[in-house]
Amino acid sequence: MGVFLTKFSAYIEAFILYIAIFFSQVLLRAVSTGIDTALPEEAVTFSVSSLLLTLFIYCIPSLVIIWLLLYRRRKPEYRLKKPVKHDLFSGLISLPCLLTIGIAVSIISILTGAAPTQPPPSPASIAGWITLCVFCLFSAYLEESFFRFYLLSKREELNLNAPLALVISAVLFGICHICDGFWGFVNAVLSGLFLGFMFIRYKTLHGIAVAHWLYNLTAFILMRTSL
């Protein structure tokens, strides 16, 4: 009975955290790029204040909660650590692979006649670009901390083997990007599978989080320059 309650509480904890992160992702998509839904599409502008509000109200508090839970882990290999040399390896491997996945999915979406994704509004000042970079960094750490570090290191408590936990983590990650359309979902699932594999291989957070951050920034810049 005690083992059952422990596993049940582990699922409940993960479920509550996922719901919170899912709804925060929906909100992030609405306000992180400064979109005011009351404005017509042509009037959409980048808002530093909206980005900062999302950062301090949702991203940072959610990240703190997940990190506190990670610090409580019994197994030392699944506790949050300082950057190590494995982070350098995983980061250098992850970034080009993420870019390759993103480019491949974009090409396939174009060949299948999918409608182009509307790029988010761009910052109009240095302060705006700095704010965007900081926000993307915390957002990447938040997603990697939960979908990779938290879920995959919790697989034994959830009674899941590594492949099944990897697939579940990637699909849940993809659902949080469903607002990007079908191909955005596919890209997120494939990227999630790869990042999950890298976490299981190296058991480190910082390399994949930084690669995720740089990928997001690169994708944002490419979307703007392609206009």
Image: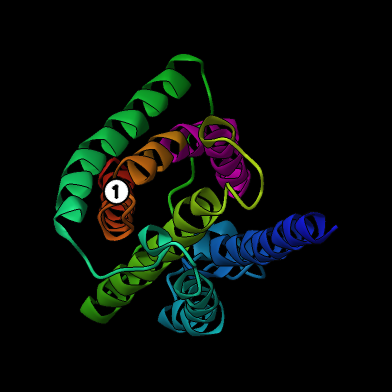
- Looking at numbered disc 1 in the image, what kind of residue is underneath it? Tyr
Q: Nearer the viewer, residue 114 or 1?
A: 1
Name which quarter of the figure residue 80 lies in: bottom left
The correct choice, above or below, for 51 with respect to 74 in the image is below
Name which quarter of the figure residue 18 lies in: bottom right
Q: Residue at position x 50%, y 74% from top?
A: 72
Give how far across and how far down residue 95 sits, in percent.
23, 43
Q: Can residue 121 be spotted in the picture? A: no
**Residue lying at the far top of the rendered structure:** 111
**Residue lying at the far right of the rendered structure:** 1
- Residue 185: in magenta span: yes
Q: Nearer the viewer, residue 32 or 185?
A: 185
Q: Nearer the viewer, residue 31 or 205?
A: 205
The correct choice, above or below, for 65 with respect to 192 in the image is below
Scheme by which the image is coloured = rainbow
Give how far across and how far down residue 36 sits, in percent.
59, 71
Where does the C terminus fall, quadrant-wise? Answer: top left
Q: Residues within 10 Å of mark 1 (few under 14, many from 20)?
A: many
Q: Can residue 33 be spotted in the picture? A: yes
- Residue 16: in magenta span: no
Chief SS of the magenta region: helix
Task: Return the residue at label 1.
Answer: 215
Give how far across and how far down residue 47 sits, in percent.
44, 76
Asked whether, in this view, residue 128 is left or right of residue 160, the answer is: left
Q: Residue at position x 32%, y 77% from top?
A: 131
Give how far across and how far down residue 56 sits, in percent.
49, 84
Identify the magenta region.
Answer: 165-192
Asked whether, in this view, residue 102 is left or right of residue 160, the answer is: left
Q: Residue at position x 63%, y 53% from top?
A: 157
